[in-house]
Amino acid sequence: MTTNNISELSFEAALQELETLVRKLEEGKVNLEDSIASYERGTALKLHCEEKLREARMRVEKIMVGTPDGTHTTQPFETS
Amino acid sequence: MYDLHHNTPEFTVSEISQTLKKTVESSFSHVRIRGEVSSFKVHTSGHAYFTLKDEGAVLDAVCWRGSVSRLQVRPEEGMEVIATGKLTTYPGRSKYQIVVESMEIAGEGALLKMLEARKKKLAAEGLFDEERKKSLPFIPKSIGVVTSPTGAVIRDILHRIEDRFPNHVLVWPVLVQGDGAAEQIAAAIHGFNNLPSPPELLIVARGGGSLEDLWCFNEEVVVRAVADSTIPIISAVGHETDITLCDFAADQRAPTPTAAAEFAVPVRRDLAKHLQHHHSRLQDQLDQKLSLLESRVDSLKRGIPDLDSLMGDWTQRLDDWSERLNMSWNTSLKTHHNQVSMISSRLSHPRQTLEKWESALQGVCKRLEPMGMRSINDNQSQLQRWGPLLESYSYERTLERGFTLTLDAQGNVVTSANAINAGDTLNIRFKDGERKVEAKEKVA
């Protein structure tokens, strides 16, 4: 909740903050100015979460072992 | 009989030993022998020497260095094993022995016993402690999978992840059974941990199989690698009923590879729905708040009275008070006027006063004149009456009647017997003179 920069939040943290915001508003103890600020932040959190969800792409790679210096390379993995 | 002896070919010791060696090695070039391990020792050369025995016999066994490292099980004292290898002799000592190439634990019971003992040992080291368990990330940025690259397991995992929450998956192909499998699995776990950008979650998986098939997941190297991993690990080895030591050391055990994928990622659709739900609640809250405030403003607005009625009240009060001010002014003036006339009426002219006093003086003078004469006459007649009376009251006339007057030495009249002490000198005055007397004691 202390991180003001939403883009640095993980999906989980952003969702949790959104939930907390909603709950606080639903308790009805927030004044108008804070309500609007909460709404703005809540919307930004939602967009951030949606972006995180959109980022999800399936990409499967296979680790190639065997280089003599112990480093590994990857190559696309094809399921048989 | 004698000839017979001579007909028997003659061998040197070496010859017979070599012949025997050939016979034994050709007849028993590949045997599996079941027995109990005893006196297991690894020589500095790296070769291992031990014996296999049962109730009736003992067989020496040797395992060359190269084979020792490939053994699936590390032989322990009293372990029931099936050793595979060939028989050979050692002519230098008139010995025969088995050269062991591979070894397996004999029977499931023995295997389970060993598993139990190993589990106890590793548990005592704390490898399975709950406090060591790491929590799984909610949405891992990428997932590492240690398993066989072929077969149903990896397919199941990938499909389920794609269904739920498509992600970046790195597969580290390993053998999941047989020689070297345990080492490969352990190396893969270490390898993932040491990647420049390691995945946030690992899945170690294998399909179902016999206890022996799954045995590599019970090996210490694997268990330690899982326990040491800084990346959280989900273990999905075998079917639900199969439990390996790898499962115990992992941060989360999944009954199947599919279940492992479910532990690994949430369902994206659900999350999106959840998110939408919260956002609409947020919106509702703000709308509600605004309309609530609006209606409050409205109702307050209605409560404000119009200017005329607001001013009318004050105007009326002002009129009222100014009226009362005028009235009070008049009243106060009249009162003062009355007071002045009342007081001025009581104010008399000095001449009147003078006349009053003059007549009073004349009255007094008239009464004073006759009073002077009358008082002189009165006094004279009174004097004539009081003279003889005074005479009759004098004490000297009393003395004539026989009473005496007692005086003390100082000439004061003594009127009390108590004023006289015995021996005092007193003067008794009679009508014809005084006599001195001395007082005696008081008469009771």
Image (tube, rainbow, N blue to C red):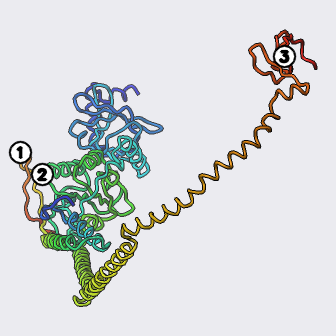
Task: Name the residue nearer the viewer: B134 or B96.
Answer: B134
Q: Nearer the observer, disc 3 or disc 2? A: 3
Camera sees residue B57: yes
Pinpoint residue B321: horizontal percent, then vertical percent: 30, 82
Marks 2 and 1: which is nearer the front?
2
Left/right placement of residue B302 relative to residue B172 reads right
- Output the chain of dot 3: B
Q: Is residue B145 above or below residue B127?
A: below
The amino acid type found where label 3 is placed reads Gly
- Check disc 1 and report the residue beneath it: A69
Residue B195 got which mark? Answer: 2
Question: Label 1 sits on what residue type?
Answer: Asp
Residue A24: % across, % down: 29, 69
Disc 1 sits on a residue from what chain?
A
CB within 8 Å, label 3 to label 2: no
Residue B18: name its quadrant.
top left
For image coordinates 22% across by 79% down, the residue present is B283
Q: Residues within 10 Å of mark 3 (few under 14, many from 20)?
A: few
